[in-house]
Amino acid sequence: MHSPLPNTRSILVAAALFLAGGTAFAGFNTVIIDPGHGGRDFGAADSYVYEKHINLDVSRRLERTLQEAGFKTVMTRTKDEFIALSERSSRANRYRNAIFVSIHFNSSWKTSALGIETYYRSSSGEKFANLVQRELIKTVGAVDRGVKTANFSVLRQTKHPSILVEGGFVSNKDERSAMLDPLYRQVVADCIARGILQFRRQSPF
């Protein structure tokens, strides 16, 4: 992975405010952020590193950056608690003019597996997934595992344009070490935010 630049976030926020022109956003203005797993559901785990904690930290960073850029945000969980998959989608579907992003980190029995991938299910999420994946790969310098379709519950049951990001492998020693660095987690959040900004500019709704 490349060493991410420390001023990524400030550049993102400045660009967002410029694009917004100091006015309210047209089209969607709410981003629903879904920190994967939580509570008794640890997600991927290795060497006392638990995916649920990384997911929540990246989600909080994404929330802060998006709020500073003028978006409304909704978190499906704000602490280390278990939330059923159906409840995550139900909470998301209460909002109009919104998009949905689920934050995850990967795992594999093959410890050499590495890289970032982004999933979508419906056609409305495909462009969204491609924009976020492109920003992640360009900035992080990780192996590009591509944009893929999947029938994940949160993508299937959520009505909004929806994606699920896998930001690296907890099971890979090097990527696990990177995700323990707050700077890396901030850069992942900022890349997702940049993809959201681009998707908003190109969104027909």
Image (cartoon, grey):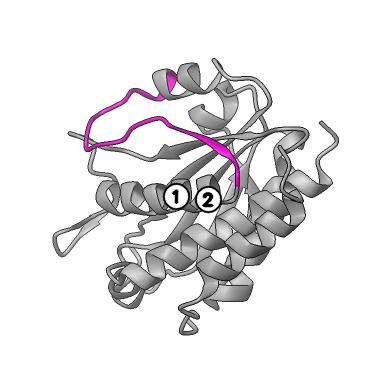
Residue 46 falls inside the magenta stretch: no
What residue lies at 55% left-to-right and 78% top-to-bottom? 141
> SS class of the residue under badge 1?
helix
Is any part of residue 9 visible from this angle? yes
Asked whether 43 or 11 is in front, the reply is: 11
Q: Quadrant of residue 134?
A: bottom right
Q: Which residue is mark 1?
A: 64
* Residue that extends furthest to the left in the rendered view of this protein: 48
Task: Evaluate if marks 1 and 2 touch, with contact meaning CB atoms under 8 Å apart.
Answer: yes
Q: Which residue is mark 2?
A: 68
Q: Magenta stretch?
A: 70-86
Instruction: State the CA–CA distance, disc 1 to disc 2.
Output: 6 Å
Which x, y percent locates residue 80? 22, 37
Disc 1 vs disc 2: which is toward the camera?
2
* Residue 139, numbered label: none
Number of numbered discs visible in the structure rendering: 2
Q: Is residue 66 above or below residue 157?
A: below
For residue 127, side relative to residue 110 (left or right): right
Is any part of residue 142 visible from this angle? no
* Residue that extends furthest to the right in the rendered view of this protein: 204
Q: Is residue 177 above or below residue 134?
A: below
What residue lies at 48% left-to-right and 58% top-to-bottom? 189
Q: Quadrant of residue 26?
A: top right
Crowding near pointer 2: few (<14 within 10 Å), some, many (20+)?
A: some
Crowding near pointer 1: few (<14 within 10 Å), some, many (20+)?
A: some
